Image (cartoon, coloured by chain):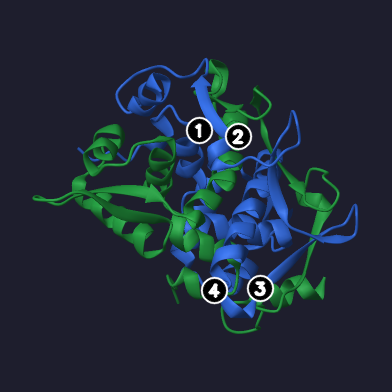
Chain colours: A blue, B green
Amino acid sequence: MARTDFGGIACSIARSAAIVGDPWALLVVRDVAVGLHRFDEIQRDLGVATNVLSDRLQRLVSAEVLRKDRYERHPDRFEYRLTDKGRDLMPALLALMAWGDRWESGAEGPPLLVRHKDCDHITQPVVVCDRCGEQLTTGSVDYRPGSGGRIAPGTALIANVLKR
Amino acid sequence: MARTDFGGIACSIARSAAIVGDPWALLVVRDVAVGLHRFDEIQRDLGVATNVLSDRLQRLVSAEVLRKDRYERHPDRFEYRLTDKGRDLMPALLALMAWGDRWESGAEGPPLLVRHKDCDHITQPVVVCDRCGEQLTTGSVDYRPGSGGRIAPGTALIANVLKR
């Protein structure tokens, strides 16, 4: 049985993936974050088919990652801006970008460097524990049941995790 | 013109997305990371069609995120393990999961809590600057050209960023 309602799986990776687990969606969020706000700008930048771009923008607006603002009337023209939820997604995208930099750049090196304006250094985004500040690794974490962790079809993982 | 060779775009988000910008791929990595290593276990956990799972496992092996180890002969049986590259992806997935926890959990709360074994606290993974330790936000970073940032069709973003 195939299932495609990822948002319905009681797992925050699945729910996030339902929104941004798509290359075009990620690239649209990236483009809006760096300052491309209009359909035509994003379309030209990505070389994406207009119907695909329309679909992704609409999904991202309905997921409240982007909002659509009218900036001109007669005719109405719109631009896309990150919402608070969309802005909050960028750190995860920076972590994903850093992974791509480390593993997919090849001999050429990273395409883009990230500068942290507050300390004025080129930064490597790292994922740390908010309690002790140490970097989190695959081996340094395990999992506990959360209040939203109902055991139901499609949530077998949670049962598996809790058995360990 | 549609383009689907995301890995060819000079952007590490695009390159990462070419590998894991797919809900099933993300969920397979998650499952392997928490200890499900065999095709049947992952298939049962995710309720995913076997052809889809075969495809995603094969892609993740060829991207060197997973490796396929034989654990039994006659008949040969295999299991999937994270490579170093796959383990290095988990922090970004934890950041994405934390975003899902914050924005998609609803009143029920997060399905799973992440415990940092080193400090023995339930942790919120946060993305920080490796130089100063401060949290990175959309507004606190900008971008500089990297050595791999050739200006070419499909890399218009970089030109855009550098104009700012």
Horizontal side, residue B67 vs residue A13: left or right: left
Q: Position of residue B114 (x, y in %)?
A: 57, 28
Alpha carbon separation for disc pair 1 and 2: 7 Å
Q: Residue furthest left?
A: B74
Horizontal side, residue B141 vs residue A119: left or right: left
Circle 1 — which element?
Answer: helix
Badge 1 sits on which subunit?
A
Alpha carbon separation for disc pair 3 and 2: 27 Å
Q: Which residue corresponds to mark 1? A: A12
Q: Which residue corresponds to mark 2? A: B98
Point out the tag, 3 or 1, that comes first from the N-terminus.
1
Amino acid carrying mark 3 in the image = Pro
Mark 4 vs mark 3: in front: 3
Q: Which residue corresponds to mark 3? A: A111
The verdict on a common chain for dots 4 and 3 is: no
Alpha carbon separation for disc pair 3 and 1: 30 Å
Dot 2 alpha-carbon crowd within 10 angstroms: few under 14, some 14 to 19, many 20 or more? many
Q: Are marks 4 and 2 in contact (CB under 8 Å)?
A: no
Question: In the drawing, what numbered circle is on residue B9?
Answer: 4
Residue A54 in view: no
Dot 4 alpha-carbon crowd within 10 angstroms: few under 14, some 14 to 19, many 20 or more? many
